Image (cartoon, helix red, strand yellow):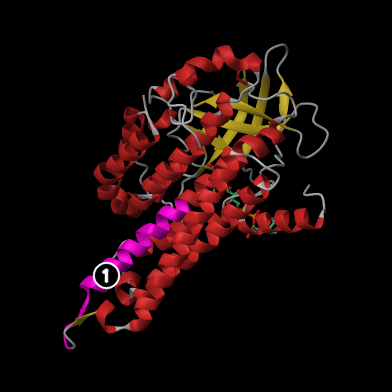
Amino acid sequence: MMTHESAVSKAREIASRVLAPTAEQNDTLGQFSTEAVQSLGESGLLGLLLPEDFGGAGLGPRTFAVVTATLAEADASVAMVYLMHILGTATISAARPGANRALTPILQDIAAGRHLSTLAFSEAGSRSHFWAPISRAHRNGGDGVRISAKKSWVTSAGHAQSYVVSALAPEGAGPTDSTLYLLTAATPGLTVSGPWDGLGLRANASAPMVLDDCQVPADFQLTDDGAGFPVMLNVVLPLFNLGTAAVALGLCRAAVTATTSHLKNAKFEHLGQSLGESLPTLRAQLATMQIDTDGLSARIDDLIDHLETPRETTMLRVLEAKAAAGEVAISVTSAAMRVCGGAAFSKHLNIERLFRDAHAGAVMAPTGDVLREFIGKSLLGIPLF
Ligand SMILES: Cc1cc2nc3c(=O)[nH]c(=O)nc-3n(C[C@H](O)[C@H](O)[C@H](O)COP(=O)(O)OP(=O)(O)OC[C@H]3O[C@@H](n4cnc5c(N)ncnc54)[C@H](O)[C@@H]3O)c2cc1C
C-alpha cells in the first residue's frame, strides 16, 4: 500500500535517477520524456489520487503537491505532464454514473501505470477563456456525439493515451454550457496539428491538436449535457491551481539551490573569496529568494488545509495560490539570473532553464490576470461570468 511517505520517496528517487540527468538535454531538444512517464507508471504514482477500488493509491492533495514539487525541482516539464495527467484522471474518475462501466478498464490501466491522460480544454477561438469552448458536440444518431475542434495547447499531445475534451453541449444555450468527453488516442480524426517550441517547459509536448469530426460514444461522455463547467470549477480548478503552485515551488527551490551552489563555488581569485563571501548584496538577494520560496510553501500548505477541510474561503485560496505562485516563481528565478550574472545568462548553470520554465505558470489558464479579475470581482460581489 502506498503512503504519503512512500509516494514522496518514490518521487525523489525518480527525480534524481531519471529526471535530473536528462532535464537539460530534453529542454534543449524539446524532447518529451517517455522514460519519465514509464518510471512514474512503474512506481504507481500515475494512480496517486485514484480510489483503491481501481487499484489506485487513494491519496490526497497533500501528497500530490509534494510529489509534483519534487518532480518540478528536477524537471518542470515532467512535473507539468504529471499534473495534467492527474487532472485528466480526476475528471475521468468523477464521471457521471452512466459512464462507469466503459471507463473502469481505463482507470485500472492508469493505476497500473500503463495509461497517461491529459486535458484538452483551450481552443484557438476562445484562447485562455477555457470555460467557453467554441466547438460544439453534435448528436450522432442514437449513440454519442461527433466533435470538430481546434485545441490550441495540449500538454502531452501525441504521447497521452487519452484526452479529456471540452465542447459546447449539443443543445447548450450559453457560452459555458459545455460537456466533457473522453477521447482515446486512437480516435479517428484526432491529430497533433503543429509543433511545440515554447520558451519554457519545452519538453512537455504542449502542441495544438485538431478534432476532425471525431465520434465519441455515449459511454465516453464524462459529464451530463451542459455540466462540464461545474466539473471544471470544482474538480479541475482546485487541483490545477494547487499543482501549478507546486511546480512553481519546485522551480523556486531549484533556483535557490543552484544560486547557493554558485555563490559558494565561484571565486574572485584576486580577492581569495567566493562570490558569497565577498558580496553582501548577493547574500541579501539569496535571502530574499529563500524568504519568498518559504512563503510560497506556506501558502501551498494553507491551500492544502483549505482543500482537506473545505470552508467559505476555500475558493478564494484556490484562486490566490496560482496567482501568487506565478509571480513568486518569476521573481525568484529572475533574482537567480541577476545574482548569478553572466554565468547564468550564458547558460553555464541550469538557472536559465528554470527562469524560462517559471514564465509558463502565469500564462496558463486561468492566467494570473484572470485570477486577479476573479478575486477582485468576488470581493466586490460582482458576478464572475
Ligand atoms: C506550456 C503550456 C501548456 C499548456 N497546456 C495546456 C493543456 O494541457 N490543456 C489546455 O487546455 N490548455 C493548455 N495550455 C493553454 C493555456 O492554458 C492558455 O489557454 C494559453 O496559454 C492562453 O494563451 P493565449 O495567447 O490564448 O492567451 P490570451 O487569452 O490571448 O491572453 C492574452 C493576455 O490577456 C490576458 N487576459 C485574457 N483574458 C483576460 C481577462 N478576462 N482579464 C484580464 N486579462 C485577461 C491574459 O492574462 C494574457 O496576459 C497550455 C499553455 C502553455 C503555455
Check mark 1 vs ligand 1: CB closer than 8 Å? yes or no: no
Q: 152 or 114: nearer the eye?
A: 114
Front residue of 305 and 317:
305
The residue under the point 27% across, 73% down is: 263
Q: Classify mark 1: helix, strand or loop.
A: helix
Residue 220 x, y percent position in the rendering: 60, 20
255 part of magenta stretch: yes
On the rendered structure, is 18 left or right of 297?
A: left
Quarter holding the N terminus?
A: top left
Above or below — where is 348 with respect to 272? above
> Residue sitting at 72 percent across and 11 percent down?
142
Q: Residue at x 59, y 41 (%)?
A: 307
Q: Is 72 situated above or below 192?
A: below
Inspect this view and state whether residue 298 appears: yes
Q: Is residue 198 above or below residue 171?
A: below
Where residue 20 appears, as percent x and y from the top left, is: 28, 49
Residue stretch rendered in magenta on the structure: 247-270
Return the x and y of residue 270 as percentages of the image width and height.
17, 88
* Three-letter code for the amino acid on which mark 1 is drawn: His
Closer to the camera, 330 or 26? 330
**In the image, what residue occupies the spot 39% across and 44% down?**
78
- Left or right, 148 with reference to 15: right
Crowd tier of the residue under label 1, counting other residues whose Cα lies within 10 Å: few below 14, some 14–19, many 20 or above = many
In magenta stretch: residue 346: no
> Magenta stretch mostly in which secondary structure?
helix
